[in-house]
Each structure stands twice: as C-alpha cells, then as structure tokens.
Amino acid sequence: MATNNNSITNELTGNTNNGIEADHGGLGFGDLIVLILDLVLLVYTAWRSYDFLTTTVPDGFQMLAMVGLWGLDIGSVAWSLVWIFGSSAQYQDWVSMAFFIIDLTGVILTSLTDSLMYGQKGGVMTSTLTGVAVVAIPLIVVLNVVAGFIYHMTSPDTKVRRTARKAAAEHKRKMGEINEMERDLIYAEQYLLARQDTLNKATILAEIKTAQDSLEKSTRAKLHDQLGIQQNANALTANEAGDDKLTALKSHLADLKNKLGTVNDSTVPVPQTEAKEDTAKTPVPALAEQKEVPFPVLQDPAQWPEAVLAGTPSPVAVKGNGHSKTDPI
C-alpha cells in the first residue's frame, strides 16, 4: 500500500523512474560482510583473468595484462560502488548497472577459459571459449572506457554546467547584438551630426559665395556700362555747374536789389506797398532756370569793371504804375 502511495506521489511530482532505481542508502553490517566476501573471491578471479590476459600479450608486456584487470574484476567492483553510492541520474544508473554485469561476464569468461586451458588442453570447449574470450575481453575493456565517458556526460552536474554555458553563450550573443546596435547608433549619430555641421557650413559659404558673385557681377557691369558712366559724368557736371550758376544768379540779384533800393531812395520815393509788389513780382525762378550767366560773378559791385558800371542802365521810377523803367542815358 505504501508502495502505491509512493508511486502516486512520484507521478504527482514528476519523479517517475521507469528504469533501475539506485539504492543510495548507508553501508550496513550485511553490506560490509558481502563486500569482504567479494574482495576475497576477486583475488581468485583476478589471478585467473591476469593469467589469461598474459597469454594474449607479447612477452615482456605482462604489465598490460594488469591494466586489463581494470576492465574486468576491478571494473566490476568499481561500477557496483558507483551504482550504490555515486550515480544520481537515470542514464548513470543504467550505465553503471549495465557495465557491472558486462564486467562480471568478462570475469566469468576469463576464469572459465583459463581453467579449461589448464584442465582440458586442446579440447573443443577450451578452443571455443578461448576464441570467444580473445575477442570479447578487449571489447569489454574498450567499452568500459566508453562507459566512463558516458557516465560523466550524463551527470547532473555536467548538465547544469552545460546549461549554464549555453545560457552564458546565449547571453553573450545577445549582448553582442546590443553592443553592435549601440555601435551602429553611435556611428549614425556621429555621421548625421557631422553631415549637419557640413551642411550648415556649406550653406553659409554658399551665401557668402553668392553675395560675392553678385557684387563682382554688379561691379563688372558698372565698369563695362559706358552709357551709365557717361550719364553719371554728365550728372556730376550738371550738379556742379548748376550750383555755380545758382550762386552767381543769387549774388547778381542781390546786387540789383541794392542798386534799385539806392536809386529809389535818392530820386523818387516809392510806396512801400509798391516796393513789396515789385519785389514779389521779380521773376526769381526765371533767373534761376537760366542756363547761361549774363554777368560775371562778382560778389562786390565795387570790383566791377568801369565799362560795366558805365553801361548799366539806371532805373527810373514811373509814377502811377508801381514799376520801374529803365531809361537809357
């Protein structure tokens, strides 16, 4: 009943072992007695195995026969101890129990064959077992080597280490992808920033070059524009001549006003209203628009030539109309 409950518990927890179950209990008194019995009896079987193995190796290489015992008598004891105290996984239990049986089979074969070699030399059974043992014993030794590798490969510790290595390798691969992405992003960032800086500089330089080209083109156009050069020269000449003419006319007009004022004061008094009207009706704009100066530009009338002063008509006031009249002498 207890066994049934244990199997149900194992099924519920997933700990189901359909193969050979290993007894990892402690070493009792009965176990000790059995082990001592096995060790004593193995002395006999080991000698038989060694004696048979020495007949299968060349002279001088009997040490190889001693090594062969590790695949027979010593191997059977080792695999039994591994199954009792060492194995912790299903495949380890299978390997240890299977090679315990295989090594015991080899021990039985070598012991029986060696005994027949001394008791029934040349017999049919002796020849048959000798032929089988010569092939089987080296094969059993080699399989023990393979079983040792399988036992360590199926160890839970090995599985844990392999899982950890796989996880570490996967983590390293993923971190490598992240580092590669970061490197690509850094490259893209530096590339775009450098390109933006280059574009900004290129834009500024293009504006400077455009302004320089426009200024140079405008300057060259002015230098090669003969009509514009002539017009500018004429304008400058006209401004200078016009200013000089305007100054000369204003000076001459002031002199005339002074002379007219002197004559009016000495001869006939002119009403103030008429004088104002005469002054207001003086055609100043017409004088300003003249292109030629009829009199020399002299600021002081005292400096005029005598011919000019003698031929100047003297204004005579005419009563009743408010205007002056020149009367030649």
Image (cartoon, grey):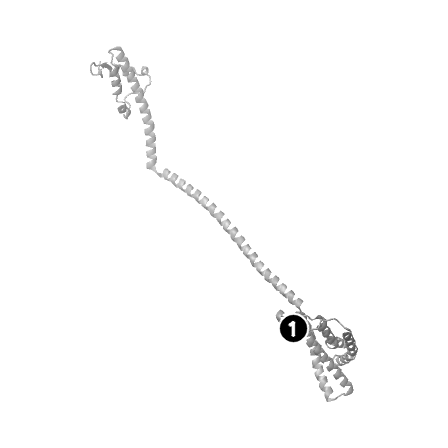
Q: Position of residue 70 (x, y in %)?
A: 74, 75
Residue at image mark 1: 5
Q: Quadrant of residue 52?
A: bottom right
141 on left or right of 201: right
Q: Position of residue 324 (x, y in %)?
A: 23, 16
Q: Nearer the viewer, residue 324 or 128?
A: 128
Q: Position of residue 154 (x, y in %)?
A: 65, 70
Q: Is residue 94 above or below residue 262?
A: below
Q: Residue furthest left?
A: 320
Q: Is residue 55 above or below residue 323?
A: below
Q: Is residue 312 visible?
A: no
Q: Residue furthest top?
A: 266
10 on left or right of 217: right
Q: Residue at x 75, y 84 (%)?
A: 112
Q: Nearer the viewer, residue 220 or 176?
A: 176
- Where's the C terminus, which quadrant? top left
Q: Quadrant of residue 31?
A: bottom right
Find numbered disc 1 in the image and state the secondary structure of the residue it sits on: helix
Q: Residue at x 56, y 59 (%)?
A: 177
Q: Residue furthest front?
A: 1
208 on left or right of 239: right
Q: Is residue 246 visible?
A: yes
162 on left or right of 248: right
The three-letter amino acid code for the residue at tag 1 is: Asn
Callout 1 crowding tier (Cα within 10 Å): few <14, some 14–19, many ≥20: few
- Where's the N terminus, which quadrant? bottom right
Q: Nearer the viewer, residue 13 or 51?
A: 13
Q: Residue at x 31, y 22 (%)?
A: 248
Tag count: 1
Q: Quadrant of residue 169?
A: bottom right
Q: Position of residue 138 (x, y in %)?
A: 70, 78
